[in-house]
Image (cartoon, grey):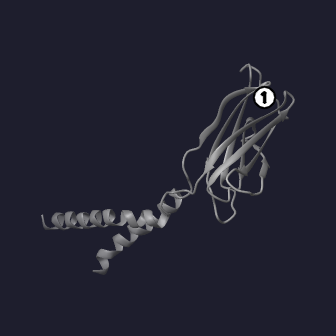
């Protein structure tokens, strides 16, 4: 009995390790501003607005900055800043400066705290050698509704157990034949 349980325990361990890795991603971002031309800029804002209770900044924003004419390169001094505030209740405004992604000023990222579910106003300001512009939008923040990593392992357990038993039966047949 103990020898038969070893492969099952090993499979459960592997599944738990994989489930932890799965928990690192919380869904694809989506656009809240898409191709809006303001001044000399063409701006798109993508977001993944996750809410957290432990105070981690899970509201992620990517600001894509292009030139209005599509030909001019974005100068190195261009900086984006994003601020959010709740629309459904009184609450603090959270703001932050976006940082270039992999040194590319045309694509910048910032993570902000979204402390509850509900609508948030989003204000993005772009400032640089081509001028200063601002764009407003809104987003609904939600909790990540996927099951916890340990639940994924629990859900997969029956399938792994059946596979282990089937493998055991196949090995027995092979030894007898």
The answer to which image quadrant residue 57 occupies is bottom right
Q: At 63% across and 38% down in the image, what residue appears?
A: 32
Task: Decide which of 134, 76 is in the foreground and name it.
Answer: 134
Where 2 sits versus 98, above or below?
below
> Which quadrant is the C terminus positioned in?
bottom left
From what the image shows, is residue 110 above or below residue 66?
Answer: below
| Residue at the image point whose x is 44% and y is 69% from the top | 13
Query: Is residue 59 visible from the viewing direction of this image?
Result: yes
Residue plotted at (69% across, 50% down): 87
**130 or 8, which lies in front?**
130
Q: Residue 148 at x, y = what percent?
A: 50, 64
- The answer to whether residue 76 is left or right of residue 106 is right
The residue that label 1 is drawn on is 74
Helix, strand or loop at label 1? It is loop
Q: Is residue 59 above or below residue 55?
A: above
Residue 6: horizontal and vertical position, in percent? Answer: 35, 74
Figure label count: 1
What residue do we see at 61% from left, 38% from top? 31
Q: Residue furthest left?
A: 177
Quarter of the figure with residue 77: top right
Name the spot of residue 76 as percent of width and height, x first: 83, 33
Quick check: 32 left or right of 72? Answer: left
For the view shown, which residue lies furthest in the front direction? 89
Quarter of the figure with the N terminus:
bottom left
Residue placed most toward the observer, 92 or 9 = 92
Q: Which residue lies furthest to the bottom in this view?
A: 2
């Amino acid at each position: 009995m103990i020898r038969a349980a070893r492969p099952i325990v090993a499979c459960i361990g592997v599944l738990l390790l994989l489930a932890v890795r799965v928990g690192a991603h919380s869904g694809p971002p989506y656009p809240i501003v898409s191709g809006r031309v303001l001044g000399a800029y063409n701006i798109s804002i993508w977001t993944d607005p996750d809410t957290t209770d432990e105070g981690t900044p899970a509201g992620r924003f990517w600001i894509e900055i292009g030139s209005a004419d599509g030909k001019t390169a974005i100068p190195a001094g261009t900086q984006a800043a994003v601020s959010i505030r709740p629309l459904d209740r009184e609450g603090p405004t959270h703001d932050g400066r976006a940082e270039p992604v992999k040194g590319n000023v045309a694509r910048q990222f910032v993570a902000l705290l979204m402390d509850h579910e509900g609508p948030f106003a989003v204000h993005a300001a772009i400032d640089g050698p081509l001028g200063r512009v601002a764009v407003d939008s809104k987003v609904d923040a939600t909790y990540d509704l996927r099951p916890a990593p340990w639940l994924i392992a629990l859900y997969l357990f029956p399938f792994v157990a059946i596979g282990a038993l089937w493998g055991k039966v196949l090995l027995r047949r092979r030894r007898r034949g």
